[in-house]
Amino acid sequence: MIENGPKLMKPKGSTSESTTASPAASGAAFSEAYDLVDLDTFALEYQIACTGTPNVKIELQQSSDNANWFIPDNSADINSSVTDKNLHGYKLAPIPVRYLRLKVTELTGIVSDTVVTFKVSAQKRYTA
């Protein structure tokens, strides 16, 4: 059994180890939230599925109460323009508040069936 990770996290209230966001053409959508309690090192895997060529922006959002979401002032876009369907990996650096989620904005204005699948891995580096 892996006690100290890295291991895939389940979104809050989910039994799945992944979550999706499906923005409409020119729209935005959000992943389910992840609870960050007792964890301090994070990685993100993501992949896009759609007809045609995708073009989406992916941003990290955070919240201390799972209701009021913001993009941390010191946070850059995870990816400002993903235009392929490859599997991507990214080291997440969330600020120490309780929740994170991912915001996906569709940039082509014409692709209406975009689905981005996310997996978040976490590791507890400090001793309990």
Image: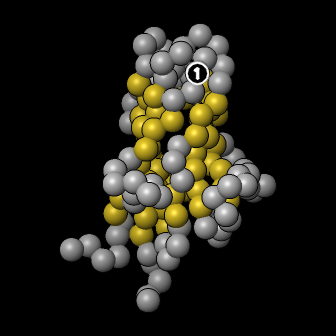
Residue at the spot x=73%, y=55% of the render? 68
Where in the figure is residue 113, as x and y percent of width and height? 48, 18
111 and 82: which is toward the camera? 111
Please name the amino acid that badge 1 sits on: Ala
| Picture quarter with the C terminus | bottom left
Going by the picture, which residue comes out furthest to the right?
73
Residue at the spot x=44%, y=88% of the render? 127
Against 127, is 108 above or below?
above
Going by the picture, which residue comes out furthest to the bottom?
128
Q: Residues within 10 Å of mark 1 (few under 14, many from 20)?
A: some
Where in the figure is residue 88, as x and y percent of width and height? 43, 40
Q: Is residue 72 visible?
A: yes
| Picture quarter with the N terminus | bottom left
**Number of marks drawn:** 1
Quarter location, residue 94: bottom right
Against 87, is 11 above or below?
below
Where in the figure is residue 41, as x and y percent of width and height? 49, 67
Quarter location, residue 104: top right
Judge left or right: residue 97 versus residue 37: right
Q: Is residue 81 visible?
A: no
Judge left or right: residue 20 versus residue 75: left
Quarter location, residue 6: bottom left
Residue at the spot x=59%, y=56% of the render? 100
Question: What is the basis of the colouring in this image?
Answer: secondary structure
Where in the figure is residue 80, as x and y percent of width and height? 64, 34
Say which element carries label 1.
loop
Where does label 1 land, which residue?
Answer: 24
